[in-house]
Image (cartoon, rainbow, N blue to C red):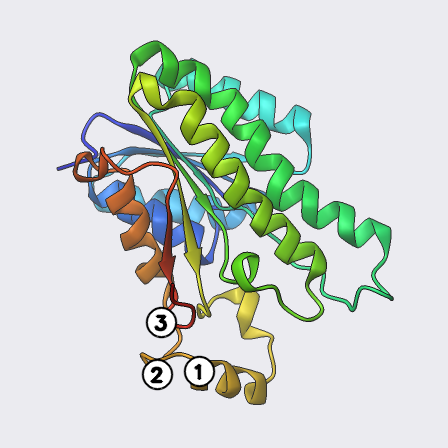
Amino acid sequence: MTGTGRVALVTGASQGIGRACALKLAQSGATLALLARNQEKLQELTGEIAATGGQAVALPMDVSDEEQIRSAFKAVLAQFGKIDILVNNAGITRDQLVMRMKRADWDSVLNTNLTSAYLCIQQAIGSMLKQRWGRIVNITSVFGQTGQVGQANYAASKAGLIGLTMAIAREVASRSITCNGVAPGFIETAMTSGLADAFKQKAVQMIPLGRAGTPNDVANAVAFLVSEEASYITGHVLNVNGGMLMG
């Protein structure tokens, strides 16, 4: 199993893509550190992983709070001694046309989606540098590549993650640490479930494969990028969008 003996930390692990990533990495033999705000959902997931013979620890944490990030990572390192794999998945939306967008909604999206990834990488990188092995995967978005009406904050944060991915990849490549992005398209999650049916149907019409993606579609891409098979891939953004954006 590719993940045996590895310690993987996933942010935003309580639902959707983060949850699917955690389950997939646990299946591959990794020990999981699960970080998110919702303690109840984290405990459920920990139980689910334990029931299949895996090991996981849940740490309630708000990624928009730097102190909470520091103490959570400190706790993981104290318990497991290392972090091999970091999946920066935590994300929020606060959609509004730019002329009406409140500064607080800009700041909260940038802090949660982009600044938190930088802070998490900063906390995990020492362990990876020391052991000369590491995998960082940032979950970005097709809208960070194409832009989207009403999502100036979200698109900017996800485009920023792509730049961050490439910069980190260059910084740490000499130590056998890779840093890649995964850019999901339209995925059926709690975040998209609130969208109007007409919007969803229109979105699916734009997808050559003719369906919305699932969290597992994204988790499979993450599992590949953190595996030994992907050791020669870094600074890359893997599109998981059903053909919605090509090229």
Q: Is residue 122 above or below residue 44?
A: above
Disc on the earlier residue, 2 or 3:
2
Disc marking residue 169: none
Under mark 2, the amino acid is: Gly
Q: Is residue 109 above or below residue 232?
A: below
Task: Work out which residue is located at the far front of the displayed protein and give it.
Answer: 247
Q: Quadrant of residue 83?
A: top left
Residue that label 2 marks: 210
Residue that label 1 marks: 204
Task: Report helix, strand or loop for mark 3.
Answer: loop
CB contact under 8 Å: marks 2 and 1:
yes
Disc on the earlier residue, 2 or 1:
1
Query: x, y (%) of residue 59?
Result: 51, 33
Residue 61 shows in this picture:
no
Question: Quadrant location of the C terminus?
Answer: bottom left
How crowded pointer 1 is (Cα within 10 Å; few <14, some 14-19, many 20+) is rated as some
Task: Report helix, strand or loop for mark 2.
Answer: loop
Under mark 1, the amino acid is: Val
Question: Quadrant location of the N terminus?
Answer: top left
Q: Quadrant of residue 96?
A: bottom right
Under mark 3, the amino acid is: Gly
